[in-house]
Amino acid sequence: MGCIKITKKSFSLLMPPPNVTGDLHLGHALTFSIQDTIVRWKRLIGYQTDFYFGTDHAGISTEGVVKRHLDQQGISYNDLSREQFVEQVWKWVYQYDKRIRSQVKRLNISCDWERYLFTMNESYSNAVLTSFVELYKKGLITYGSYPVNVCTNCKTTISDLEVITEPKEIDIYIFQFLTRNNKKYSVVCRNPEDLIGIRAVLVKEESELSSVQELYNPLDNTWVKVIADKDLVHMEVGDFEMNSPFAIPLLPNKRKLHFRRWSKYLSNDLSIEKKNCLTDSDAKFMKKRIKIGVDICERCSGPIEVTISKQWFFRIKIFAQDLKRIINEEERVIFHPPSVLEDVNNYLDNLEDWCISRQIKWGHRLPVWRCHKCQGDTVDIGIVEFCEKCGSKDIAQVPDVLDTWFSSAHWLFANFGWPKKTKELETKFPVSMLETGRDIVFFWVIRMMLVSLAHMEEIPMREVLLHGMVLDAKGQKMSKSKGNVISIDELLGKYGPDIVRYGLLSRSVPGKDIRLDEAVFQNVYSLVERLQHMLNEILNLSSCNDSIIGHDLVDWLWGKVHELYHWMVSGMENYNFQSLLQEVTQLLHQVIKWTRACIDSNYSINQSELRCAISALLMLLEPFLPELYKKNIKIIQETEIITLESILEVTPKVSHFQSDTAERIEKLLNQLAKEIGQGKSRGVYCSFNLNIEKNRMFELYGKAIVCNTPFQFASHNVNGTVLRYEAEPGIEILLITEQSEYFTPLDKFFRSEIRNLNRELKGINDRLKSKKFLLNAPLETVENQKNRSKWIIKRINSLSNVIQTLAVM
């Protein structure tokens, strides 16, 4: 058995802060259940733990839900000043922050509530803004024109990670561009309005167009340059990259232009803009419907425009290779599952600098003050009164806020007091583990590492544990529109926190999505109810007498306690909770069934010894079932089993009870009872031949085994017809009844068994006749096959005799 040495080391895990956009969902319940289970296990084996909780302001997402909330109240976002809108957001935050904390407490999460932190709190905001200023001074944050993604619904820039591609049918437009000698060439585009103002057409060197110098653009009646190149003409290269080697003048975002030829087409609705452009132009075109991948906003599914815009960028690209070395060569962080490393390395190899400015009102406002006189920027965390470049007092803070993911990337060191050099930061950073969803490994996990490298020259965690998405039973993402959402509050109200936790964990494998329906929780509820009934029976036991079987049962239970400990040690190393809880569930079913069977059989059991073993079991189960542990604390308090050390000090004696054998015999008895008929079976007595090899177990536990079947246990001599049946080598069942005709239906059952045995015997004989098998198989295997053959022949003869006996009954 594996063994963990009790330690006084520390373990820290900071819970990923949920967004204050609304109530928690099952994904949150899963991540908090995984984290709390790990932390409780660490405490159990002697670790000092730091387990902190907080919430995230979630800039764009929270702004979006508050906008919709205000719309429902008849309040327009555009009618509110920045200050008025932020005031409305704070009202929302106070409401949902309180609800989220309440839900986390209902989930029985054992975090340190005194260390609660919100990402818009003063201390955290100071950390984020200080970070921006320091990175700017180091030249790691810059301001410049680059192509960026703009969500036309959210009305802000977003990162590449927030853009997803989905198949969609769209219209494409085919225009005829003319050369100087009136030769026509087709130009295909999705957005004809974007052709207004194009400066060049890029073609392959081998193209017929490579000899043409200019083309006439019929949409705005201008001549555009034709450039031939062998390297840049392919699908992956965008306009911004093409501009560099050819010095093509760039146009800024057309929505910020006020030139006559663009302004008349501009609209907040892209379809109207397209229509205006096509209606106004005399250009002839052909429209065609095709299906292609279209970029949309991951958050709101709004259309994405790629445009050149002046934004603030964090130069994370320069840290990419350092981080790869730390992860792959130095192995300073372990990923669960390790398969995610391939995606991580690919992401780092293709990493681009991060646009961190957002054009919204809610969030950490950039500590940047722009001079209206010289257009220079002054970057400072405090209130700036004059421009540091020209001295003008005509300055104002820029309206943009920081990307939420940039703000939350400081979570693992801002929690310990950074930018101050605190004792906590010195001793508790980096944290032991980060557990979070696989879907935000690039949004958050890798970016945290990069931000941490920039400030701390260290990665912020030693282990990364990733879980998958919670899906419905059909593997579909849960959504209100599909009607497949399972509410946390409803589950907690119906089943309680233990069942929700155990149910979620029972489906959890690192990195794998979880298919879930309510049946999972119903099954766990049934298990816990049976476990509680067993505990109630133990509490109500009044007997303190010693008996051989009582001591033997306790020895068996202690064996199960150490078996559970073995599974816990192994399972908590790889975090495969699904596999671990399969073993735990099977073990609990055995403990519940046979402990209750012994109690129901009125065996004399020493209550004190039994409570000690059950207390140890409850202590090991506490990380999975903390509410059950707390509810039954009385059992534990009345024993000396109060620590893991005291559990491991107990050396279990070998018990005569073998649960696997008992399960098989019980199953066989129930099959025989079914053949006889459930009603008739109650008139049949059952006992075991105690004069053969395995008699000790059945002498002690025969009554408990039979009590789980329709038969009655023959505790004394019973008159009637006796049917002897060798169930397994050394295990003979005796069925006794005064109604011998009850046994008649068993003829078919025994004949079926003989057919199965004959098939097995043929396979064994074929192997024993094979020279290849005899030459290659170990001698022990050959001998086992020969012994098995002898037993089968003996058993077939025995069953044939039983059938003959049945024939004359």
Image: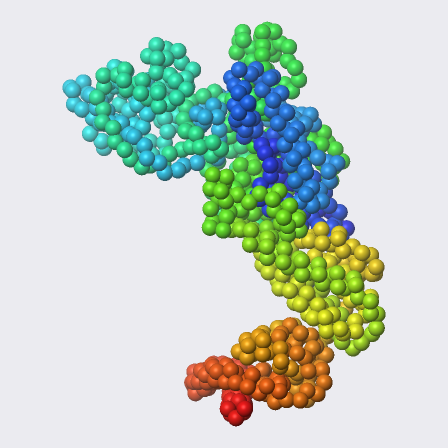
Q: Residue 519 in the image: x percent, y percent?
A: 55, 54
Q: 196 or 535: which is nearer to us? A: 535
Q: Note whether 420 is above or below 590 in the view shown.
A: above
Q: Residue 257 in the image: x percent, y percent?
A: 40, 13
Q: Residue 686 in the image: x percent, y percent?
A: 64, 82
The total number of labels drawn is 0
Q: Note whether 525 is above or below 676 in the view shown.
A: above
Rendering quarter of residue 113:
top right
Name the residue rendered at 37%, 10% in the picture. Answer: 259
Viewport quadrant of the C terminus: bottom right
Name the residue rendered at 39%, 37% in the picture. Answer: 166
Q: Residue 223 in the image: x percent, y percent?
A: 25, 16
Res 181 visible: yes
Q: 791 or 74: which is nearer to us? A: 74
91 left or right, relative to 211:
right
447 left or right, relative to 170:
right
590 left or right, relative to 179:
right
Res 211 visible: no
446 left or right, relative to 591:
left
Q: Note whether 288 is above or below 702 in the view shown.
A: above
Name the residue rendered at 47%, 42% in the picture. Answer: 482
Viewport quadrant of the N terminus: bottom right
* Snapshot colouring: rainbow
